[in-house]
Image (cartoon, grey):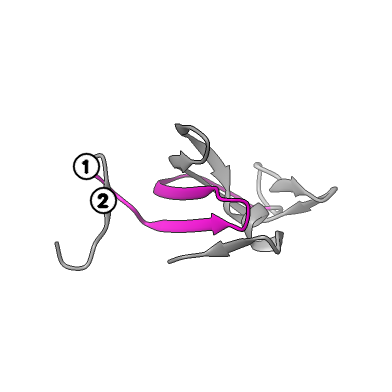
Amino acid sequence: MNGKKFVEGNEIIAAWKSSTGWTWLATEVSEIRRIEDETGGSIINGKPENDIIYYGLVLGPSEEWGYFSGREFEVNERIERIF
């Protein structure tokens, strides 16, 4: 469907995989956290960072829908963005 990818009827807007076998398939942006506004950002490696919190399917030893931090993936060398 126009090059779009879907999981359980939900469009995948971003995806990551780790060297340890986990995959994260984001289907929506849940929250944008900025240091300069009331959200205060996310604490990543002990300091505040701008962040995007996604909701989607997490695939590993089990499957689970949940929330995850885009910024945590950016700073983790073992996680690679697929698209």
User: Furthest-left residue in view?
Assistant: 1
Q: Quadrant of the N terminus?
A: bottom left
Mark 1 residue type: Gly
Residue 38 image point, x, y percent: 66, 42
Q: Left or right of 24: which side holds 73?
A: right
Within 10 Å of the Cα at label 1, are there few (<14), some (14-19), or many (20+) other Cα atoms? few
| Segment tinted magenta in the rendering | 9-34
Query: Do callouts 2 and 1 mark residues in contact (Cβ within 8 Å)?
Result: yes
- Seen at 45% across and 57% down, the residue is 15
Within 10 Å of the Cα at label 2, are there few (<14), some (14-19), or many (20+) other Cα atoms? few
Q: State yes or no: residue 77 in magenta.
A: no
Q: Left or right of 47: which side holds 19?
A: left
Could you tell me what secondary structure mostly forms the magenta stretch? Answer: strand
Residue 45 image point, x, y percent: 82, 51
Which is nearer the eye, 83 or 18?
Answer: 18
- Marks 2 and 1, how far apart in space? 6 Å
Which is nearer the eye, 78 or 65?
Answer: 78
Mark 2 residue type: Phe
User: Furthest-right residue in view?
Assistant: 46
Q: Which mark is drawn over residue 6?
A: 2
Q: State yes or no: residue 22 in magenta.
A: yes
Write down the residue under mark 1. Answer: 9
**Element type where label 1 sits in the image:** loop
